[in-house]
Image (spheres, grey):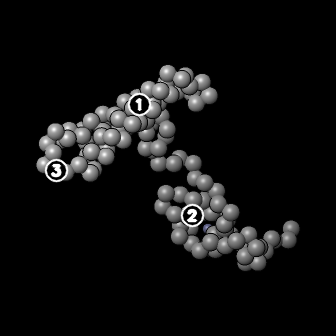
Amino acid sequence: MIDPDKIKKSQVKKLLILLEQWTRYEVVSRLAPIEKLEYGDAFAEMIKKENEIREMLYGTSNFVELGDAWNILRPRKKKRKTKLYCSICGRVQYDTTSGYTCKKGHGGAESLSKKEKRKKFPKKKK
Ligand SMILES: [Zn+2]
């Protein structure tokens, strides 16, 4: 993986060349007339160039490895707390893959703002 702060001039040059080659192959594969058979492999060449660029930048062009390294293939483990509250029980709502829910599992319950929550669920006096 290339560190943006430590990239060498030779790496920048190589990257610029790869980007131009990749772009040229993409232009040909998208726009060249179909009867130009010599351009037949442009799409395959474009994919090869994309992979070369990824290998140079990230050390691999394997999507599974990249997705794993970037933790984007697995569902989010941690539920993200929102600033909204459950209209059924007044607890904070979490943003999950299946929508907003509270700790009690009131999935899909209407969301309340903090102000609305305070109004609907006033603090009990001890
Ligand atoms: Zn609730």
Amino acid on which the number 3 mark rests in the picture: Ile
Q: Earlier in the sequence, mark 3 or mark 2?
A: 3
Q: In this view, does 43 lie above or below 79?
A: above
Which residue occupies 86% across, 68% down? 126
- Between residues 90 and 24, which one lies in front from this camera angle? 24
Q: In which quarter of the image is ligand 1?
A: bottom right
Q: How crowded is mark 2: few (under 14 residues within 10 Å), some or many (20 or more)?
A: many
Seen in the image, is 50 located left or right of residue 13?
left
Dot 1, how many residues are within 10 Å of its Cα: few (below 14), some (14-19), or many (20+)?
A: few
Between the C-alphas of marks 3 and 2, the distance is 53 Å
Crowding at dot 3, Cα within 10 Å, few <14 / some 14-19 / many 20+, comes out as few
Indicate whether 81 appears above or below 122. above
Q: Can residue 91 be seen in this view?
A: yes
Q: Eyeballing the image, is 43 above or below 115?
A: above
Q: Are marks 3 and 2 in contact (CB under 8 Å)?
A: no
Q: Name the residue under label 1.
A: 17
Query: Which x, y percent locates residue 81?
Result: 64, 56
Residue named by callout 2: 101
Q: Residue furthest bottom?
A: 120
Residue drawn 51% across and 48% down?
76
- The tag earlier along the polypeptide, 2 or 1, is 1
In the depicted view, which residue is nearer to us: 89 or 24?
24
Question: Decide: marks 1, 3 in contact (CB < 8 A)?
Answer: no
Question: Does residue 62 appear anywhere in the picture?
Answer: no
Quadrant of the rendered image containing residue 9: top right
* Residue 78 on image: x %, y %: 57, 48
Q: Seen in the image, is 96 located left or right of residue 29?
A: right
Q: What amino acid is labelled 1 in the image?
A: Ile
Secondary structure category for the residue under label 2: strand
Mark 1–mark 3 distance (CA, rounded to whole Å): 26 Å
